[in-house]
Each structure stands twice: as structure tokens, then as C-alpha cells.
Image (tube, grey):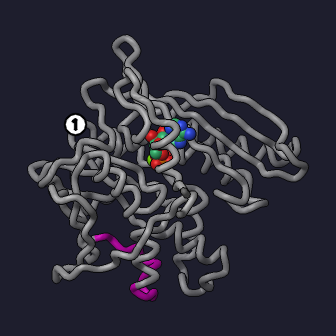
Amino acid sequence: MSLDEFGLVARYFTRPVPERQGVGDDCALLDVDATTLALTTDMLVEGVHFFPGAEPDALGHKCLAVNLSDLAAAGARPRSFLLALALPAADPTWLEAFSRGLFALAQEHDCHLIGGDTVRAATRGGPLTVAITAIGEVDPGMVRGRAGARPGDDIWVSGWLGEAALALAVRRGELPAEALGAEAETCFRRMDRPQPRIALGRALAGLATAAADVSDGLIGDLGHILERSGVGAEVIWDDVPRAPAFAGLGTIRQQHCILAGGDDYELVFTAAPENRDAVRAAGARSGVAVSRIGRIEAAHGLRLRNAAGASIGDTLKAFNQFPT
Ligand code: ADP
Ligand code: MG
């Protein structure tokens, strides 16, 4: 029997816990006295999550960014992080640039490196592996995970999706950079230096009923919310915002990148319809656009439709670490 990433975790690594929130959400939540801590860990492996020889300054940024993005989903304020490195070599030039990128983002979010571990990679030459555990704080009355979506809730996304997937397609040689015109730089930046939506995540405290960051693609990450919440959804493709980079590209490419492309680190979240204005205000306050793309329904499953109501794209699958 073959298991995908989520089936594997569900089967072997999920046990009942006394904590407020455990396996299955972007962050675990621990109550410590009057404080609620949000914890998350994400590992990036050379050749799997980034290309060998990736620019170290950008890599330092990204390794922390993907963790802060999980804190954003939970609405947490970053506080500190731990850094575990498996290094193929101790190269001062590389370490200097990596730590610069890492600390620049850490400082931006007032998040402090408080420990970690450093080991030699198993074989000479790699693979370089970076694992970060990030710790944040949530207002105890404002916790949220992926399980709170209710039928009738609106579904929202922040910013634009799919630009990182376009950059990946170019790097893999599947798409000429010229196809993106002047937007190519923007797409590469999205892939290499994602901006965790910390401000929005916090501004949505008390408004969003459920949230996840879009690390594996909209369909996959919204799917986690639906599964955890025991609900289904209708998403209107025409309402999902398009980045300018998609202007000259075909529908299949657009759908693939925007609905199933990973690495964008935007937020997908749900909120009651009476809070539409408040959600838009939270977006404006945080300097990020928010778009309403669908509705939570009681019937399980994700239904993708165009503006005319016709079903589309049901064959799209989100990126999965261990596809079956
Ligand atoms: P994210 O993309 O937000 O980092 P994932 O979707 O990859 O989270 O993981 C889903 C859930 O499974 C998370 O709650 C994560 O903490 C949990 N998880 C993943 N791997 C393991 C593991 N080896 N042991 C326990 N929990 C795990
Ligand atoms: Mg996440």
C-alpha cells in the first residue's frame, strides 16, 4: 500500500494530545500560563525544495519565511526560532550570505534565533538541509486553525497565487522566461523571497473562522481546511485573482499554477459573510489585497466552477510530496 505525505502522518504520527491544537493544523497551540504559543517546524532539502546552488541570501530568507507563514496562518506574532543545519561543507562565504538573508527577515518580524543544531551532511556535497522551528504568540481568545470553517462562510485568498509556480516552470525549462515579459523578475522574487503574511494573519484574529497558508497549492491547502472542518466548498475560478504575469498565458497553464501551484505563501481563509467589510479593512490595514473566491457548503468536496456555474478543473491535483 502506498501512502502520500498526509496519509503517512495521519496513520503513523497522529495521536490524541492534551494540547489545544496538534497534528493537522499549520501550528500546534500550547497554553503556557496565560500565554498561548504557536509552534511550527518546516524543513527544506536541497534538490527537493530548492535547486542545488541556490543563492544563499535568498535561501536564508526563504527557510525562515516558510515557517513564519505558518505562524501567519495561525494569527500568531513571531517571537523566536530554532535553526537546525546539515551542511555539506563549512563555507564562510555561503554562511555569511545565508545568515544575512535569515537575520534580515528575522529582524523585520522581531523574531529571535534562540538555538538549534549544526551537523555535517551525510555525504560530501550534500544534500544541504535546513530545518527551522518557529515559535509565536497568539491572543488566547483569538486562536484559529483549519477546523473552524462553517457552511455559509465566504472563502478568501490574499494577494495573488501562481507566480512562484510560473518561476518554477521557467527554472525547470518548461516555459521560456520571455513568456512572462517584464513580470519574470516579480515571479522569481515570489519564489525566492516569499513574504509571510504576518500582519494580515494577525489582523484577521477574531474574523477568520479558519485559515491555512498556501504552501502546497490552493486546492490542496483549502482541501485541508475542508477536511478538518468537515465541510465542502464551491470556488469560482473567475473570482480567483490573476497576477499580471498570466496575461499572455493559456487557461490550462493559469489553472495549473493558480489552483495547484505551491510556494506562494499567501493565506486562504474563511469568514462569515457579515464580516466582509471587516475582512477588506483587515487587508487594507495590512497592505495586502484580499479576494473573495467562493463559499463553504455543507456537502463535502471541492467544486470548481466558472462564473456561468459550469464545473471545471476537477482533475487538478495539488503538489504532494509522495504522490500515490
Ligand atoms: P504545513 O504545510 O503547514 O507545514 P503540512 O500540511 O505539511 O503543514 O502538515 C500537516 C500537518 O501534519 C501539520 O499539522 C504538521 O505539523 C503535521 N506533521 C507533518 N509531519 C509530521 C510528523 N512527522 N509528525 C507529526 N506531525 C507531522
Ligand atoms: Mg502551512
Is residue 139 visible in the rendered structure shown here? yes
Residue at left 28%, top 42%?
147
Image x and y of residue 99, in percent? 72, 41
Does mark 1's beta carbon lie closer than 8 Å to ligand 2?
no
Tally of marks: 1
Quarter residue 298 falls in:
bottom left
Asked whether, in this view, residue 208 is left or right of residue 75, the answer is left
Asked whether, in this view, residue 298 is left or right of residue 23, the answer is left
Residue ranking furthest to the left: 274
The one of 115 and 61 positioned closer to us in this rendering: 115
The one of 90 and 25 positioned closer to us in this rendering: 25
- Is 246 above or below relative to 10? below
Image x and y of residue 158, in percent? 34, 57
Residue ranking furthest to the front: 1
Residue type beneath disc 1: Gly
Q: Which residues are magenta?
A: 240-251
- Secondary structure found at label 1: loop
Asked whether, in this view, residue 230 is left or right of residue 192, the answer is left
Quarter residue 38 falls in:
top left
Residue at left 31%, top 26%?
139
Image x and y of residue 123, in percent? 87, 48
Does 247 lie within the magenta span?
yes
Q: Main secondary structure of the magenta part?
A: loop
The one of 210 and 92 positioned closer to us in this rendering: 210
Image x and y of residue 323, in percent? 54, 63
Residue at left 54%, top 56%?
1
The 10 Å Cα crowd at callout 1, few under 14, some 14 to 19, many 20 or more, is some
Q: Which residue is mark 1?
A: 206
